[in-house]
Amino acid sequence: MAYQVLIDDNFHYQDESERVKHGVFATPEEAVMACQSIVDGYLTDAFKPGMTADDLFQSYTAFGEDPFIVSDGPEGAPVKFSAWDYARQRCAEIAAG
């Protein structure tokens, strides 16, 4: 089974024409790590000293990339990963320093 990472753009919410194919991975763990890396990249670039976790999360949900995973298994066999949930956790960690 293969796991494909696709990326939607939060700035163009629900506009599938803005969707990007990121890559195909052999395991769900590799696909999740790729998604986490995409989110971390945005958060690291967007964070400014003194920014609160809420400010960073608001920036992410407005302008960040929203990766998700689909598989070629039965009915798309979705992998449990929420970029927004992961971003919220990481915003708290990043803002805390």
Image (cartoon, rainbow, N blue to C red):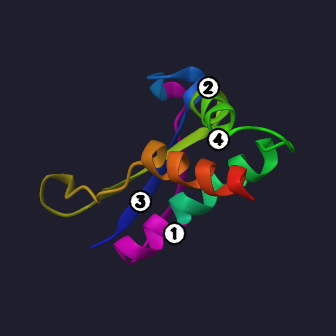
Q: Earlier in the sequence, mark 2 or mark 1?
A: 1
Q: Which residues are magenta?
A: 17-33
**SS at badge 3:** strand
**Left or right position of 70 against 40:** left
Give the number of the mark in front: 4 or 1. Answer: 4
Q: Earlier in the sequence, mark 4 or mark 1?
A: 1
**SS at badge 1:** helix
Q: Which residue has dot 4 on it?
A: 53
Q: What number is the disc on residue 87?
A: none
What percent of the width, then of the height, locates residue 74? 12, 60
Amino acid of disc 3: Gln
Q: Is residue 32 magenta?
A: yes
Q: Residue at x 71, y 38 (%)?
A: 52
Q: Real-space Cα distance between discs 2 and 3?
A: 24 Å
- Disc 4 crowd rating (10 Å Cα; few below 14, some 14-19, many 20+) is many
Q: Residue at x 27, y 73 (%)?
A: 1
Give the number of the mark in front: 4 or 2. Answer: 4
Q: Which residue has dot 1 on it?
A: 33
Quarter of the image for the C terminus: give it.
bottom right
Q: Earlier in the sequence, mark 3 or mark 4?
A: 3
Q: What number is the disc on residue 62?
A: 2
What percent of the width, then of the height, locates residue 91? 62, 48
Amino acid of disc 4: Ala
Amino acid of disc 1: Met
Amino acid of disc 2: Ala
Circle 4/circle 1 CB separation < 8 Å: no
Q: Residue at x 56, y 29 (%)?
A: 10
